[in-house]
Image (cartoon, rainbow, N blue to C red):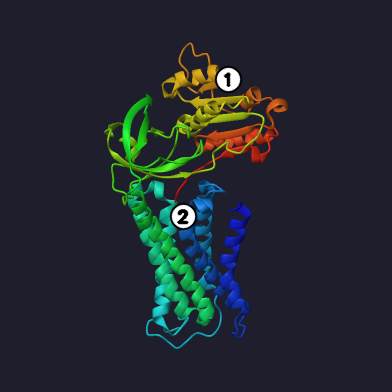
Amino acid sequence: MRPVTLIGGYISIVLLPLGLAWLGARPPRSFMNELATGTGILAFVIILVEFVLSGRFRAISGKVGLDVTMLYHQLLARTALVLALVHPFLYRGDFNYQRPWDPTRQLTLANDFDSLATGLIAWIALIVFVVISVARDQLPYRYETWRLMHGLGAILIAGFGLHHTLHAGRYSQDPVLAGVWLTLFGVAIVSLVFVYVVRPILQRNRAWRVVSVEQRALKIWELTLKPENHYGLDFEAGQFAWLNVGNGSFSLHENPFSISSAPSDKDSIQFLIKELGDFSGSVGRIVPGTKAYVDGPHGNLTVAGREEPGIALIAGGVGVAPLLSILRQLRLEGDKRPSVLVYANRIEQQIVHREELEALATDHGTRVVHVLSEPPQGWDGLVGLVDPKMLGTLFQPAGSKNWLYILCGPVAMMETVESALLEMGVPQHNIVSERFDYD
């Protein structure tokens, strides 16, 4: 599916309940009351569609990139929260009969307390849900614990929200709109079941085995896997996969890593993993023969189908992994276009596969430019950070403005590089990068 199709489909689904409510035969109310209902409808439909957006379905993310899909997932979750927050406070009109706990009747909106209670639970849970998601990096939980809480919280919000919508929603008394709500809720639950049940079952027949774990640089390890009784993984150079090592296929212990090997090597796949924490902090202790599962490929950080006259690869630290995959594939394919790798690290000991990169310069003609921010004495490469001045020197606008630029590394570095390239006149569609921040 093309991106425009995906966007159009999303807008159509989100607006469908509003359209059905507008076409209903209910008598009109005041503007504020209709606005209150509209914000509630929009909030709930966005929440239900979020289940599909977060499911890592390649049919959805394949054309726009998983990072873009997850970015929209995050932005839409925040949008749903804002709409839900204002929803109950927009209502105006006569209040219902007096409640014992509400002598002024200013807190009572309906006679059906059960439907209001479920709405209130969903409302409070959504606030907690989004706040915890945004602050995930500051919480004392492992990623796997947070992911389980995320899934259970989403079910709770959707379930209580559905009850509130069907029983307290004025327009949801229409059987057609009620059917839409039930259908969307069903799709949300099915997508969740597929992610947490069906996909792990399918993965059980596509296990991998760890062949080797080798240290390639300071705190950077290369993990090599071989397929077990299946043909392997079809992927494009530059893509990544979710890796689950040493656990069952139903385990939530999986993390995304870029594939560093070339797609032409069908016998195995390789990942470059930096020690940071949780799984990556113990990667050096993985024993060969350990079973693993791979969910992929994902990502659009590729040169496949691109016909620009030259290719520039700009990497920071372990971000060289997908770019190494691209370079390996370009060499195997005999691609004759000029190529440059700008590889930035803090110290010399962090350079990965230095000998192979030198061989690429000889065998394939790739120009390899090393950049260190803390160089040793006698260092003959570039010094400092990859900034606009350095890029302007390396890539003269007249000769490389129409090249393809692939970026991978720390977010701050990629933002600096992208801004510099745009100022140099490089078209936006010639710059490819991926940013991942899952909440």
Q: Nearer the viewer, residue 284 or 424?
A: 284
**Outermost residue, right side:** 398
Question: In the image, what residue occupies the spot 50% across and 84% down?
Answer: 95
Q: Position of residue 406 (x, y in %)?
A: 57, 34
Q: Residues within 10 Å of mark 1 (few under 14, many from 20)?
A: some
- Which numbered disc covers residue 365? 1
Asked whether, in this view, residue 169 is left or right of residue 291, the answer is: right
Q: How many marks?
A: 2
* Amino acid type at image mark 2: Ser
Q: Position of residue 160 (x, y in %)?
A: 40, 71
Question: In the image, what residue occupies the spot 62% across and 37% down?
Answer: 306
Asked whether, in this view, residue 288 is left or right of residue 93, the answer is: left
Compared with 274, 12 (above or below) is below
N-term mark: 1 or 2: 2
Q: Tag 2, which secondary structure?
A: loop
Distance between mark 1 and mark 2 Cα atoms: 41 Å
Q: Position of residue 55 (x, y in %)?
A: 45, 55
- Which numbered disc covers residue 375? none
Question: Is label 1 in contact with label 2 (beta carbons under 8 Å)?
Answer: no
Compared with 405, 192 (above or below) is below
Q: Nearer the viewer, residue 79 or 218?
A: 218
* Amino acid type at image mark 1: Gly
Compared with 381, 110 (above or below) is below
Q: Tag 1, which secondary structure?
A: loop
Q: What residue is shown with label 2?
A: 54
Q: Nearer the viewer, residue 379 or 406?
A: 406
The picture quadrant where one finds residue 149 is bottom left
